[in-house]
Amino acid sequence: MQEFLLPAIKNALQAAAITTEKPVQLEKPADNKNGDYSTNIALLLSKECRRNPKELAADLIERMTFPDGTVDRITVAGPGFINFYLAPSFIMQSVEHVLVEGTGYGSSCTGKGRKAIVEYVSANPTGPLTIGRGRGGVLGDCIANLLETQGYAVTREYYFNDAGRQMQILGESVRYRYLERCGQGTAFPDTHYQGDYIRDIAEMLFAEHGSALQDSTDLGVFRDSAEAIIFSSIRKTLERIDIRHDSFFNEHTLYTTKENGKSANDEVLELLRSKGFIDRYDGATWFLTTKLGQEKDKVLVKSTGEPSYRLPDIAYHLDKYRREFDLIVNVFGADHIDEYPDVVEALRILGHDTSKMRVAINQFVTTTVNGETVKMSTRKGNADLLDLLIDDVGADATRLFFIMRGKDSHLNFDIELAKKQSKDNPVFYLQYAHARICSLLRMAAEETGFRQDGTGRHLMQKLATEPEIQLGFALLDYPEVIRSAVRLLEPQKMVEYLHSIAELYHKFYQECPILKAEPEICTARLFLSLATRQVLQNGFRILGISAPESM
């Protein structure tokens, strides 16, 4: 919408013989009484031009030219702001692009020919999926959807943590419960996984093998069985909220010796050592992050010989670079906030362009139950399970509530609100706007013979009331909202925007008679409704929620 305003301002500066390095910026005033767009360029340049900012603004306005029918008027406000008011007919003419582009409205070719990988969820296969992991899953899925609208070829990846100490504890936990089932009164350690799902896995092993495994010291069958069962459960849970991955990267492959006799982890240590960033002391192997200005070095291999989380994570991301992705996005929980900067530094030291790597940290989730916030523990077996939440509030509310707050903010999931059938519930409010439009269009087809094929959409240019113009103008923001959400890796921007569209549509619906209006205005308002529905549908697709036609 503003692409013709910036050249007009720059041409006016040139005509006034004003040269400057200061950028010309346009903003949308908070109050539309101050115009559709505004610039402070006269204020910025008044001192160096030695002119009164109001007089300079008036002079620039005199020198501006625009395509016919685009700008209704220009005013000087306050100490020297230049405010532009677009012609209502031009705004509504622009809304026709929503209908012409349809499902492609808001998309771009910015990422065309470029590969992106988005890693998300990556939960350890040590227990059912929790609500906290679910938030990261929805955040990552929406980010992947956003990138696809910009033309990227997106790979959705799950880093499968199937190595390390936690898997040993999982195997031991199942073995303890299996021995209990066999009648051996073995004390169960407090440090192990205590959920009922461990008993269920042990029961399955007993049903298959009887007591045959009770004298075995090999944890393999216990660990591998638990891993397979739990990961199958995780995938099924994710599918319930429409999250599916294209690839799964197994952590254990980073420990596996290759033909050269080294593992991927070994190669990382060797490469960092060649750069002078590895030392061994206190029985452990250290990443010398003090050379980077940090207070302490970081352990890569513990004195026990077990790698810390940082080492396989560096090796894994080195593999991502070797797969030649143009954009690498990682969605992590807040528990990674201290670790990932070291991974980035290691990759930079090894000569990789870390500007390709983006990290989205999502904060923790708690749930409100009967007005009380409850925080739970996975290992203790009383975790807030994602499956139970989906059972309670449904897939749409689960997805939307996870992203209706910024990823950097702690999320308190209000279960009672998520189940309300009222405007207070954000998902209900959005879906009701869509259903209302669908109902209107059905009635219009029956009563007026309205066709959605585009015939008569030019009549929207006749619309000029405030609710109509506000709604139409807001629909034109959709592409920029997507770009902003991509830039910030923040789907919440989409939620806020769609909520404002729903709000403007409900106002328009209440204040502007549609089916009872004279024929041309009726048709115009129906097409404006159709454009609104298209934007809602496109946004819902990114957020991964359904677009019901009736409620």
Image (tube, rainbow, N blue to C red):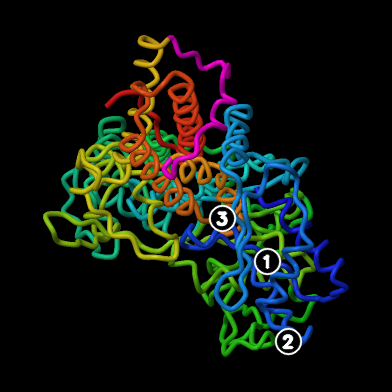
Q: If you read the primary sequence from the N terminus, does the residue marked by circle 1 or circle 2 appear first?
A: 1
The type of residue carrying mark 1 is: Gln
- In reply to whether residue 353 is colored magenta, the answer given is no
Q: Is residue 255 visible?
A: no
The answer to whether residue 488 is above or below residue 147 is: below
Pick the residue in front: 241 or 182: 241
Q: Which residue is mark 2?
A: 47
Pick the residue in front: 101 or 385: 101
Q: Secondary structure at mark 2?
A: helix
Q: If you read the primary sequence from the N terminus, does the residue marked by circle 3 or circle 2 appear first?
A: 3
Residue at image position (46%, 14%) is 450
Q: Residues within 10 Å of mark 3 (few under 14, many from 20)?
A: many
Task: Give the distance between the C-alpha atoms of the residues marked 3 and 2, in whole angstroms.
Answer: 26 Å
Q: Residues within 10 Å of mark 1 (few under 14, many from 20)?
A: few
The answer to whether residue 97 is above or below residue 381 is: above
Q: Which residue is mark 1?
A: 25
The type of residue carrying mark 2 is: Lys
Q: Which residue is mark 3?
A: 36
Task: Give the distance between the C-alpha atoms of the residues marked 1 and 3, in whole angstroms.
Answer: 14 Å
Residue at image position (71%, 59%) is 356
Task: Give the distance between the C-alpha atoms of the residues marked 1 and 2, in whole angstroms.
Answer: 18 Å
Q: Residues within 10 Å of mark 2 (few under 14, many from 20)?
A: few
Pick the residue in front: 482 or 20: 20
Coordinates of residue 271 in the picture (x, y in percent): 77, 69
Between marks 1 and 2 in the image, the one whose residue lies nearer the viewer: 2
Pick the residue in front: 33 or 220: 33
Q: Secondary structure at mark 1?
A: loop
Contact between marks 1 and 2 (CB within 8 A): the answer is no
The answer to whether residue 246 is above or below residue 216 is: above
Among the 4 quarters of the image, the one containing residue 410: bottom left
Q: Which residues are magenta?
A: 449-467
